Image: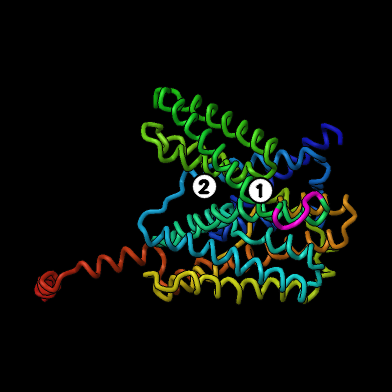
C-alpha cells in the first residue's frame, strides 16, 4: 500500500468519524450508532473508500494500542462504591460467564449454523459488553446511579476475559493447545499475568506522576502515561498474547486510586484521547464488514442474536440480581442494555484472518455473525436506551426530582399552600 493511499485511508476514517460525532451532537442521536453507520458507508458494504486489511499486520498493532488506551481510561474511571454495586458486578460477571458462554455456543450452532468449535469462539468473543459503547451511552443519557457504574464495570471486567478466552479457544481449534487443561491454565496465566503486570506498571506510573508538578506539566504527565501504557501493552502482548487488555485496565485502576497523582486532571486528557480512539476505530472496523458475509446467515443469524438479546441476557441478569436491592425497573434496564463494541469487532476481524490462514471452515461466517451481533445490539439498544431509561424513570434528572419531592416536608407544603392563598 502506497503512503498516499495510507494517508487517504486514515484521513477518510477520521473525517467521517468526526462528522458522525458532530451529527450526534446536533441531533441527539447516539454517537456510537452514527459511528457504526459511517464505517459501513465508507467500507466494503458501501462506497468502498476504506479497506482496513490494507494496513496488513499494522492493523492489529494499531487496534491493540488504541484499545489499550480506551481500557486504561475505563480503569482510571472505574468506580465501585458500596457493597451492592460490587456484588452486582461480580455476580453478573460470573453468571454471564457461565450462562452466556453456554447459550451463545448453542445458539450459534443450532440457529446460525456454525460448527461447534467455531461457535465456541463466537460465544467467547461476544461474551462481554463493550465499555467503548456502554460508556458513551451512559454519559449521553445520564443514567442515575448505580446503573452506570454497574454497566461500565461489567464491561471492563468481562471484556479482557472474553478476549483471552476466545484466543485460547482459537488456539485449541487450530491445534496450538492440546486439551482443556492447557486452556484453563492459559486463561489463568494470561489474565493473572496481565493483571500483575498492569498493577506493577500502574504503581510505577503513579509514583512518577507524584513527582511531577501539577499545573505547568500537564503535557509531561500525558507523555509519561502514554509511554508507560504503550510499553506495558507491548511487553504484555510479547510475553502473554491478549494479556495487554487486563493489564491496561489494572494499570488505569491503580493510577486512579493512588493519592497525589492528580488523577482528575489526567483523566480529562486521557478521556479526550480515548474518545478520539473510538472515533477512529469504530468506522475503521465497521468498514471491514461486507454484506456478502452477513447475507448467508439469513434469519438464522438474526434469530441467534435476538435470542442472546431478548432471552439470554435478561435471564442471566435476573439470576445475578436475586437478593440484591435493585428494583424491577433497574433489573429490566440491566437486562436490556448489552451492546458489543470495538474489542469484539477487533478480535473478530483478527481471528477470522487467522482461521482462514489455518484453513478452518466457517471463518467468514464467524466474522459475519459477530458483526451482525454488533450491528443489532448497538443499533437497537443504542437507539432505545435513552427512551427506555426515561420511561422507567432511571435518568439522573428523574432521581433528583424524586429526591426533592421526598425531602419536601409536610410543613413546607403547608407554608407553600398558605403562601399561595
Q: In this view, does 336 lie to the left or right of 169?
A: left
Where residue 161 appears, as percent x and y from the top left, is: 61, 53
Q: How far apart are marks 1 and 2 (CA)?
A: 21 Å
Residue 380 occupies which quadrant of the picture?
Answer: bottom right
Where residue 76 appears, as percent x and y from the top left, is: 47, 43
Residue 17 image label: 1
Residue 257 image label: none
Q: Residues within 10 Å of mark 1 (few under 14, many from 20)?
A: many
Identify which residue is drawn at 19% across, 68% down.
Answer: 408
Where residue 374 appears, as percent x and y from the top left, is: 68, 61
Question: From which residue to which does the magenta span run?
Answer: 176-181
Q: Which of 40 and 226 is in front in this view?
A: 226
Residue 127 position (above or below residue 11): below
Q: Which of 112 and 25 is in front in this view?
A: 112
Tell me the mark number nearer the camera, choosing from 1 and 2. 2
- Magenta region, mostly helix, strand or loop? loop
| Outermost right residue | 359
Identify which residue is drawn at 42% across, 76% down.
Answer: 328
Where residue 413 appears, as percent x and y from the top left, is: 15, 73
Mark 2 = which residue? 74
Q: Which of 322 and 407 is in front in this view?
A: 322
Q: At numbered mark 2, what does the secondary structure look like: helix, strand or loop?
A: helix
Looking at the rendered image, the quarter that the C terminus falls into is bottom left
Q: At numbered mark 1, what does the secondary structure look like: helix, strand or loop?
A: helix
Query: Is-magenta flag for residue 393?
Result: no
Q: Residues within 10 Å of mark 2 (few under 14, many from 20)?
A: many
Residue 256 appearing in the image: yes
Answer with mark 1 or mark 2, whichever residue precedes in sequence. Answer: 1
Q: In this view, does 214 lie to the left or right of 232?
A: left
Q: How are the colours assigned in the image?
A: rainbow
Looking at the rendered image, the quarter that the N terminus falls into is top right
Amino acid at each position: 500500500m502506497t503512503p498516499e493511499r495510507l494517508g487517504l485511508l486514515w484521513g477518510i476514517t477520521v473525517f467521517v468519524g468526526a462528522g458522525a460525532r458532530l451529527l450526534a451532537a446536533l441531533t441527539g442521536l447516539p454517537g456510537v450508532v452514527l459511528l457504526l453507520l459511517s464505517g459501513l458507508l465508507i467500507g466494503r458494504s458501501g462506497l468502498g473508500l476504506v479497506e482496513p486489511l490494507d494496513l496488513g499486520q499494522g492493523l492489529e498493532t494499531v487496534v491493540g494500542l488504541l484499545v489499550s488506551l480506551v481500557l486504561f481510561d475505563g480503569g482510571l474511571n472505574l468506580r465501585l462504591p458500596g457493597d451492592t454495586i460490587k456484588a452486582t458486578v461480580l455476580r453478573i460477571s460470573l453468571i454471564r460467564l457461565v450462562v452466556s458462554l453456554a447459550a451463545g455456543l448453542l445458539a450459534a450452532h443450532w440457529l446460525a449454523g456454525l460448527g461447534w468449535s467455531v461457535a465456541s469462539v463466537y460465544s467467547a468473543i461476544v461474551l462481554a459488553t463493550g465499555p467503548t459503547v456502554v460508556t458513551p451511552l451512559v454519559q449521553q443519557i445520564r443514567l442515575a446511579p448505580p446503573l452506570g457504574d454497574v454497566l461500565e464495570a461489567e464491561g471492563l471486567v468481562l471484556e479482557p476475559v472474553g478476549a483471552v478466552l476466545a484466543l485460547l479457544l482459537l488456539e485449541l481449534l487450530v491445534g496450538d493447545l492440546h486439551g482443556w487443561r492447557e486452556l484453563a491454565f492459559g486463561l489463568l496465566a494470561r489474565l493473572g499475568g496481565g493483571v500483575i503486570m498492569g498493577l506493577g506498571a500502574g504503581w510505577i506510573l503513579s509514583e512518577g506522576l507524584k513527582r511531577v508538578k501539577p499545573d505547568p506539566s500537564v503535557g509531561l504527565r500525558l507523555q509519561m502515561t502514554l509511554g508507560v501504557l504503550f510499553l506495558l501493552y507491548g511487553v504484555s502482548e510479547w510475553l502473554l498474547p491478549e494479556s495487554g487488555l487486563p493489564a491496561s485496565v489494572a494499570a488505569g485502576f491503580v493510577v486512579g486510586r493512588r493519592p497525589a497523582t492528580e488523577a482528575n486532571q489526567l483523566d480529562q486528557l486521557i478521556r479526550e484521547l480515548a474518545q478520539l480512539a473510538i472515533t477512529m476505530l469504530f468506522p475503521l472496523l465497521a468498514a471491514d464488514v461486507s454484506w456478502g458475509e452477513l447475507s448467508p446467515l439469513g434469519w438464522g443469524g438474526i434469530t441467534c442474536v435476538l435470542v442472546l438479546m431478548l432471552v439470554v441476557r435478561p435471564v442471566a441478569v435476573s439470576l445475578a440480581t436475586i437478593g440484591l436491592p435493585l428494583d424491577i425497573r433497574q433489573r429490566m434496564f440491566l437486562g436490556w442494555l448489552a451492546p458489543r463494541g470495538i474489542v469484539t469487532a477487533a478480535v473478530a476481524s483478527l481471528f477470522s484472518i487467522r482461521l482462514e490462514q489455518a484453513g478452518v471452515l466457517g471463518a467468514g461466517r464467524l466474522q459475519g455473525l459477530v458483526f451482525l451481533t454488533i450491528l443489532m445490539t448497538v443499533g437497537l439498544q443504542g437507539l432505545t436506551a435513552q427512551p427506555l431509561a426515561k420511561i422507567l424513570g432511571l435518568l439522573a434528572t428523574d432521581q433528583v426530582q424524586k429526591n426533592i419531592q421526598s425531602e419536601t416536608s409536610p410543613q413546607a407544603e403547608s407554608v407553600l399552600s398558605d403562601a399561595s392563598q
